[in-house]
Image (cartoon, helix red, strand yellow):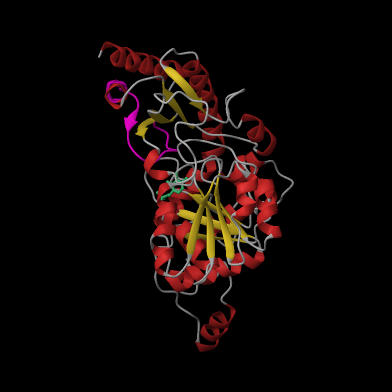
Amino acid sequence: MAGGNDDSYARSTRLVTVGRSGDFADNVVNPPIWRASTHLYANCADLKARKARNEDGQFFYGRRGAPTQWALAQALTALEPGAAGTVLYPSGLAALAGALLAVLRSGDVLLVADNAYEPTRNTAMGLLKTFGVEHRFFDPLDLEAFEAAFCDRTRAVMLEVPGSLTMEVCDIPALTRIARDKGAVSLIDNTWATSLGFEALGHGCDIAITALTKHVGGHSDLMMGAASAGERWYRRLRLGAQQLGHVVSPDDAALALRGLRTMGVRLEQQSKTALAIAQWLDDRDEVAHVLSPMLPGGPGHNLWQRDFTGGCGLFSFVLKGRDDVARCRLIDALQLFGIGYSWGGFESLALPFDVDPIRSTMAWPKEGWGLEDRFAIRLSIGLEDKGDLIADLTNGFAAMNEG
Ligand SMILES: *Cc1c(COP(=O)(O)O)cnc(C)c1O
C-alpha cells in the first residue's frame, strides 16, 4: 500500500506517495473524484456512531469533505513537518481570513507584517476591524520595533516571507520567538516557498498557510488554500472552517493533488531559470535593483540560505530612473510573459507594481536608494526556455529604450 507518511523518505519521494492510502485510493494511482454531498449510512446505529466521532478522513456529509478532499488534506499534512492536520479553503485568501478568524476574538490586537499580501492587509483593516479586532502594521526587518509593538491584548502575528512584491526576507525564528514569549500565536503565509522550501512550523510558526492556487495547483486552473498546524491550532482551524461552512470541490481537490505530484520538479526548474534571469537583469544598465532572495549578494540572501531549502520562480526588479510609461513600454512589448495577477503556474507572467499605497511603515524607495528608482516589475518565471525568456526581455528593454 502506498502510505506515504513515512518521514524517512526524501521530499521528492513523498510528493509521489503522500495521500494515496488504501482508504482513499484502492487499486488506483489517483483517488477517485467523489462528487457527493450525501453519504449513505448502513443503518441508524452507523449514523449515530459516525456523528459522534467527527473524525478526519471520514465521509460524514459533503461539507466535511469526501475522500478526495481528505486525500489532499492528508497529503499536505504529511508534507508539513510538525503538522497534525490541514484544513482546505476555497481560496488562499479564504485560508488566511479563516485562520485569522479562528484565532482572534473581539478586543484582540493583531500585528501584521507591513509587506504582507495586500488582501491580507485589507482583511485586517476591514472584516477583522468590524469584529472588534485591532491591527498594527510592523516592519518585519526591525526586531526592536516588532517587540515594542506588542501590548497586553496582542493575540496574533501575521507573517509572510519573502515580503509580497518587494521580497524582503525576515528572520522568522527570531520573530516567532518574540511572539511566543509574548503569548501570541504566529501565522505565516508560506505561499512562495511552500512546505518544500520552508519548514514553517519547524521555524517557530504555529499555523502555516498556503495559497494552493499558486504552486500546488501549478497550472493556473484552480483556486484553493490550506492551513496546517499542530494539534492545538489544527483543532481551532477545523472548528472555525466547519462553522464558516468552508468546503472545496472534489474536482479541484483532485487537480490540486495532481499538481502536487510535479510541484518539486516544477519549483526546481523555475528556481533555476529565475536565478539565471535575475543574474542577467542584475547586469542590465536599466535595472537599479533585483529583489530576489535567491540572488547571491542580493537582499535577504543570507537568511534565505540559512532558513530555506528551496525557492521558486517569483521575484521583482526595479527600473533605474524610469517612469511608469517606460515600464509599460517594456511590459507591453513582451510576447512570452503574460500580464496578470497570480503566479506559480507553468507560464511566465509580468506585473507592474507600486508599493506606496500598500505600505504603512516600510519605506519605498528603500533606504539608500535613489528617489527616482521606484518603478518595479514582478516576474513569475514559468517553464519556458531560459534563452527564449531572456530574448523576450531583451526585446522589452529595447522597446522601453526606444520610447
Ligand atoms: C495569491 C496569494 C494569496 C491568495 O490566494 P488566492 O487563492 O488568490 O486567494 C495569498 N497569499 C499570497 C502570498 C498570494 O500570492
- Classify the position of the N terminus by image quarter: bottom right
Give how far across and how far down residue 266 sits, in percent: 51, 34
Residue at x-position 67% and y-position 39%:
307
Q: Position of residue 247 (x, y in %)?
A: 43, 64
The image quadrant that residue 387 belongs to is top left
Q: How many marks?
A: 0
Q: Quadrant of the C terminus?
A: top left
Residue 4 visible here: no
Looking at the image, which is closer to me, 383 or 34? 383
Magenta: predominant secondary structure element?
loop
| Residue span colored magenta | 328-348
- Farthest right residue? 8
Residue 40 seen by the camera: yes
337 to the left or right of 266: left
Of the pair 24 and 264, the residue shown nearer to us: 264
- Position of residue 175 measured from the top left corner of the image (x, y, whole percent): 65, 49
Name the side, left or right, on which 172 lies relative to 93: right
Frontmost residue, 388 versus 204 = 204
Q: Using the image, determine if residue 25 lies above or below residue 218.
A: below
On the rendered structure, is 282 left or right of 395?
A: right
Residue 197 x/y as whole percent = 61, 39
**56 w.r.t. 403: above or below:** below
Q: Which residue is drawn at the image coordinates 31% and 21% (left, top)?
A: 330
As for residue 243 lying within the magenta part, the answer is no
54 w.r.t. 251: above or below: below
